[in-house]
Amino acid sequence: METQTTKEKVNTYQVAQGRVKRAVEQLDLPDDVYEWLKSPDRLVECGIPVEMDNGKIRVFTGYRSQHNNALGPYKGGIRFHPDVDADETKALSIWMTFKCAVARVPFGGGKGAVKVNPRELSMKELERLSRKYMQAMAPILGPEKDIPAPDVNTNAQVMAWMTDEYCKIKQHNDFGVITGKPLDMGGCVGRETATAKGTFYAIREAARVKNIALNEAQAAVQGYGNVGYYAALFLNQAECKIIAVNDSTGGAYNPNGMDPTALKEYKNETGSVKGFPGSDNITTEELYAMDCDILVPAALENQITADIARTVKAKIIVEGANGPTTPVGDMVLNDNGVLVVPDILANSGGVIVSYFEWVQNNYNYYWPEAQIEDRLQQKMMDAFHYIYDYHCDCSDKTTMREAAFMYALKRLADTMKTRGWWG
């Protein structure tokens, strides 16, 4: 049985490798395919010296993992987090490879990170760190090589600093090097909400196949950052009742439902959703055990262990976060009949709209928001039904996550074989 201690020892990189290994075995592919995909093509780790406001130098550790580029340039966000390490960065780059293959966008997988708590930095220190990271990584980045984007604790402003630094190094504007930028630097309308909007479309399609009416449904959201907030907002706009949310400091529960925007404003004022007027305080464990129809994990990795999974009463889990469910937790949920829409499908809206941004940067021609919205919706609907139908065609024990990895792996393996990488 998994315990809290076991949860803390889960190695995300080994989990990602296990997903790939399982898909290779299920498709009966040669071991050569797994050898190609079990580790990144390149991992860069570097020290990033930054002058702090007090004049002292502090050295941060930065990473960039480039996993596989069979389908196109490496693509993946850059996160700033105090607990990030090389293994987590490599794992996330593997997930990006498979996410891009599932979404059918012409990218491979990459990921970047800096081991830092950005809340401890001033804006000037954050800018200097962002620019120094780009200086360190610029030789391996570029719109035809590797295209970063925002991730945990980074945003459009951080991307603007990094893009500007890259342009200085190259001595010409090359905005396509990064996506998730501000609009006046070649950003794409709808990018800020794209991951959550894609997650909402996945929820909507999952509800349809499970015969759940959203306007009669109840939902709980774990994590109330960008993805969690907007996912709750879009669900609420579809008349789904948001009965429970939480963040890193606590949770709020109201069986009559809560207004996502009012929750966000309260969190901005107090630093937490805990104590929201009219709600009861709840723990993360209580949120996962909530009697609801839809559960949206939108925080960090390895949250749903086997012990947590056994308490889940939701009919659908749609993963707004990357890797929120452990392998054993996945098995428990499948045995209990919970439909899990996996991260590499559910939160691919961000990379889909990043693809739109990259295309527009390359053409220097920009589409209206309605066109972006329609294209995102269509790609998410297509991806969901590709994977759901594949899942239904497989054995009863094949989860949607396994189906997603198998579907993506088939695309990757075929392309790698055509390119002469194996076989």
Image (cartoon, helix red, strand yellow):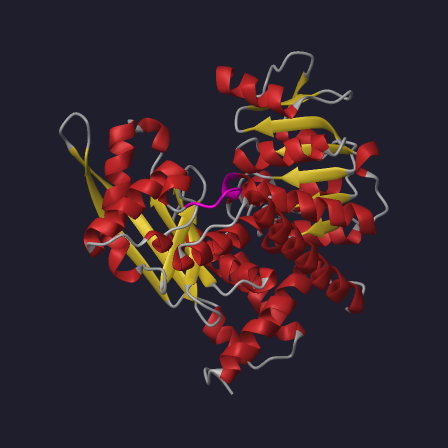
341 relative to 265 in the view: left or right: right
139 relative to 218 in the view: left or right: left
125 relative to 218 in the view: left or right: left
Q: Residue at left 30%, top 54%? A: 174
The residue closer to the viewer here, 348 or 255, is 348
* Outermost residue, right side: 211
Task: Give percent across and percent down for residue 172.
Answer: 23, 54
Q: How many marks?
A: 0
Task: Give percent across and percent down for residue 339.
Answer: 76, 50
Residue 191 is covered by the magenta coloring: yes
5 relative to 328 in the view: left or right: left
Which of the 4 image quadrants contains residue 187? Answer: top left
Q: What range is drawn magenta here? A: 187-192
Task: Give percent across and percent down for residue 321.
Answer: 57, 44
Asked if residue 90 shows in the view, the reply is no
Looking at the image, residue 59 lies above or below residue 216: below
Q: Residue at left 41%, top 65%? A: 73
Which of the 4 image quadrants contains residue 311? Answer: top right
Asked if residue 257 shows in the view, the reply is yes
Looking at the image, residue 248 lies above or below residue 92: above
